[in-house]
Image (cartoon, coloured by chain):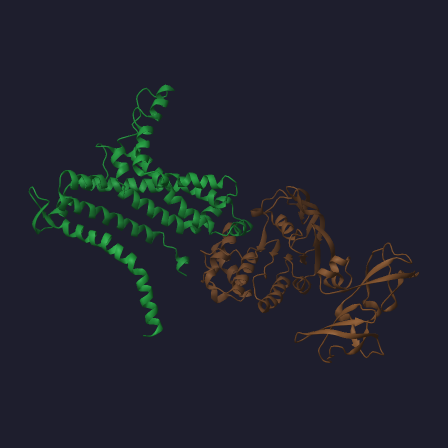
Chain colours: A green, B brown
Amino acid sequence: MNPLASKKRASLLLIAPAALLIFFFLVLPYLTIVVMSFRVPGDGTPYAPGFTTGNYLHFFSDSFFLQQTFNTLMIGAICTLVCLVLGFPVAWQLARGNSRLRGIAYGIVLSPLLVGIVIRSYGWTIILGNNGMINRTLISMGLVDRPVGLMYNTLGIVIALSHVFLPFMILPVMAAIQGIDPSLESAARSLGASRATIFRRIILPLSMPGIQAGCILTFVLSLSAYVTPALIGGSKVKTMAVTVVDTLVDTFQWPFGSALALMLAVTGAVIVVIFARMTRMKWKAA
Amino acid sequence: MTEVSIERLTMDYGVHRAVDGISLRIRNGEFISLLGPSGCGKTTTLKVIAGFEHASSGAIRFDGNDVMQVPAEKRDIGMVFQNYALFPHMTVAGNLAFGLEMRKLPKAEMQSRIAKVLEMVQLSSHADRYPNQLSGGQQQRVALARALVIEPKILLLDEPLANLDAKLREEMRVFIREIQRRVGITTVYVTHDQAEAMTMSDRVVVMFGGKIAQMGTPAEIYDQPASVEVAKFVGQVNLLRMKVEAITGDGGMDVSGPFGVIKVKSIEGAAPGRAVTVAVRPEAIDLVSPSEGQAATIASSYYSGSLMDYRARLADGTLIDVQTFPRQRFADGEAVGLSIPADRWWPLEVTA
């Protein structure tokens, strides 16, 4: 055997464990879902024999599901934007700051990841609820006389999800900023650029790889989040992920639930691809 | 075209005084080098001129106007950084256009200026490349072009050749100097490489510990160093301890040492009986036959192609470095004579 072929064989062997894991626990289940989404809904059973496109027709003909898909995508987009706006300055400080507090700040940033998602979401219900911390404070201060609706609505879901996914924005953006040579800022200044211009023309475009990664992560995670929207949204506001689980578990409609899940995945993927295209960095490829 | 004057400039970082009251006048169109070891304050001085750092005290004037309160982006300075600091997400033309866009130049003028400067640095065909598609030398030229295209008052260069290999570095010295002459721009060049400073500059400013140790033409710095420190930092030097025999009336003095009694320029504090340090450069010494010069034997030799470095031992054991062209070769242990023209001796300081 020639050395090139044996090298190739070695690298295949190295990839194999991960590839097998992905195949059996991601590709195969996905294929099952795809097949399931074309099955005929059963009566008393999860599905009946035969195949149909009826599940998708149902999705496209019912404005309730279309509206809910749209709402879910909006929640994802808003969370992404909130995380970017809140996360960028933090990422900047972590990357460029030389304060001794940097280590502590880093710990605070990572802290949402250290607590289980269920506990975190319950934590938010304590803070956001009608009888929660925020409303009690506002009422006792006399600023409002009725509780402000912070739970069981989109606002509450956005607040809680943004908190949960903030680290996924901060970390990649921080890594990108760390890769920017500080002398570029000096060079831009010497060429006559103001601080705002340096940010817009130098820092922002060069942080783009991190911003892109952070936005895609946050967006995808927000779309697929289940526990947080389920707890904060309750029965009033539902995201697609919650509806999918309801459809599968409560009403036992496996084929239609699968179609819903796939429609969410496909629309999300389309948006991610469009976003990646729009933020493509020509200089990176060069 | 700008004259720069620096007056009693001091820069403190906490308790550390990086620049200690330096004063310097840079003439219109002059190429000046700040030369010194790392930490001598040369880069700090450059940063203060550029406006990136704020001096603790002192003044900097461009054509008589105090610029201490003018922020870096308004000082109209062209700067070349050690790592080039090219914008990686912009093409060569984009990098050059950046400074012109800040000045809101009309598009047509921008393009003609960029084309002109790119031609000057011989990169016209690379306008659409990204920096990571260029070699180190090409990136260096883009950095120079970007600094020059804005037609700044002053050009500042911070160790611009430090990241290039030796051969390219020598080429770039000549290249930068030629362009500077053609543009006629006042230039401050920071380096720790004495050969670079000597070959490129009109005047060299040698700095140690935040202070100016000496300032003068390259020949003055080399042939008439102001101190032992300067003499050692700029090139190789033999330092010999000698005794003052007499102060002569014509501003000179007679000193005695391993080479007998020689006549040198008198220096401050010199009096008969005092010890002085006298310098002589290795290449000022000729190797002749033992009968014609000071007798010595070759202790060791180093051949470097165009030059030959010898270490010769005098009768009293003193080791003298000699540099010659390898036209005539001497073997280790061979008896030679050392011949030194009287005007190549340079007294440095009184030591005792």
Q: Is residue B26 visible?
A: no
Is the residue B204 above or below the residue A252 in the image?
Answer: below
Q: Quadrant of residue A170?
A: top left
> In this rendering, would B273 be left or right of B188?
right
Name the foreground residue: A21 vs A284: A21
Q: Quadrant of residue A283?
A: bottom left
Is the residue A82 above or below the residue B198 in the image?
Answer: above
| The N terminus of chain B, quarter of image | bottom right
Measured as percent of width and height from the top left, residue A31 is found at 19, 53
> In this rendering, would A162 be left or right of B75?
left
Name the foreground residue: B125 vs A103: A103
> In this rendering, would A169 be left or right of A67?
right
Measured as percent of width and height from the top left, residue B19 is found at 68, 48
Q: Is residue A154 visible?
A: yes
| The C terminus of chain B, quarter of image | bottom right
Measured as percent of width and height from the top left, residue B223 is found at 77, 64
Q: Residue at x 47, y 65 (%)?
A: B126
Q: Residue at x 49, y 41 (%)?
A: A102
Q: How many marks?
A: 0
Q: Quadrant of residue B26?
A: bottom right
> In this rendering, would B131 be left or right of A213?
right
